[in-house]
Image (cartoon, rainbow, N blue to C red):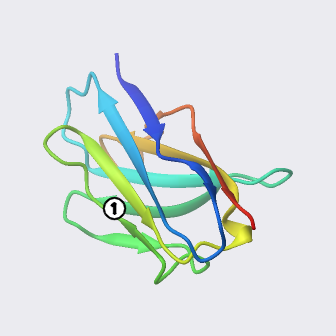
Amino acid sequence: QVQVVESGGGLVQPGGSLRLSCAASGITFTIRSARWYRQAPGKQRELVAFITADDISNYADSVQGRFTISRPNADNTMYLQMNNLKPEDTAVYYCNIARYPWDDGNWGQGTQVTVSS
């Protein structure tokens, strides 16, 4: 059974950085889609970044140039480097691991990121 666990969230001041981790276990397939989402209070979950097995990555306009997604490594761990954080980045961040980009994939429980002075 696939398990996905996010970590690395916390409280950071505006302009600060965090690196989120997503560790997947029980993987029996090649990961061809790895995505980070976030959900702020009262808002819908939104796609923040994704990366494919071919290293094709894409970002939401709101995080372009500030966030960097890495492809899952040999241990099936992926990261989201977040720099120059803003209060509007405050949300619960989730990762999603899938065999194919069109699959529903496997979700973690999320990690809270709070950007506040």
Please tell me which residue is depicted at 46% across the width and 84% down the height of the picture: 65
**Is 24 located above or below residue 86 in the figure?**
above
Q: Name, please, the residue furthest toward the bottom.
A: 65
Residue 115 lies, in percent from the top left, at 69, 63
Please tell me which residue is depicted at 26% across the width and 57% down the height of the picture: 71
Please tell me which residue is depicted at 26% across the width and 50% down the height of the picture: 32
Residue 27 lies, in percent from the top left, at 25, 28
Q: Quadrant of residue 23?
A: top left
**Which of the pair 22/30 is nearer the observer?**
22
In the picture, measured across the screen, residue 10 lies left or right of residue 33, that is right
In the picture, measured across the screen, residue 114 lies left or right of residue 57, that is right
Specify few, some or many for label 1: CA neighbours under 10 Å numbering under 14, 14-19, or 20 or more. many
Q: How many marks?
A: 1
**Is 18 located above or below residue 33 in the figure?**
below
Residue 77 seen in render: yes
**Which of the pair 14/88 is nearer the observer?**
14
Residue 113 lies, in percent from the top left, at 63, 52
Q: Quadrant of residue 80?
A: bottom left
Looking at the rendered image, the quarter that the N terminus falls into is: top left
Helix, strand or loop under label 1:
strand
Q: Name, please, the residue furthest toward the top.
A: 1
User: Residue beneath label 1, please?
Assistant: 51
**Which of the pair 43/66 is nearer the observer?**
66
Please tell me which residue is depicted at 48% across the width and 73% down the height of the picture: 83
In the picture, measured across the screen, residue 12 lies left or right of residue 26, that is right
Looking at the rendered image, the quarter that the C terminus falls into is: bottom right
In the picture, measured across the screen, residue 99 lies left or right of residue 92, that is left
Task: Residue type at mark 1: give it.
Answer: Ile
**Is 6 located above or below residue 19 in the figure?**
above
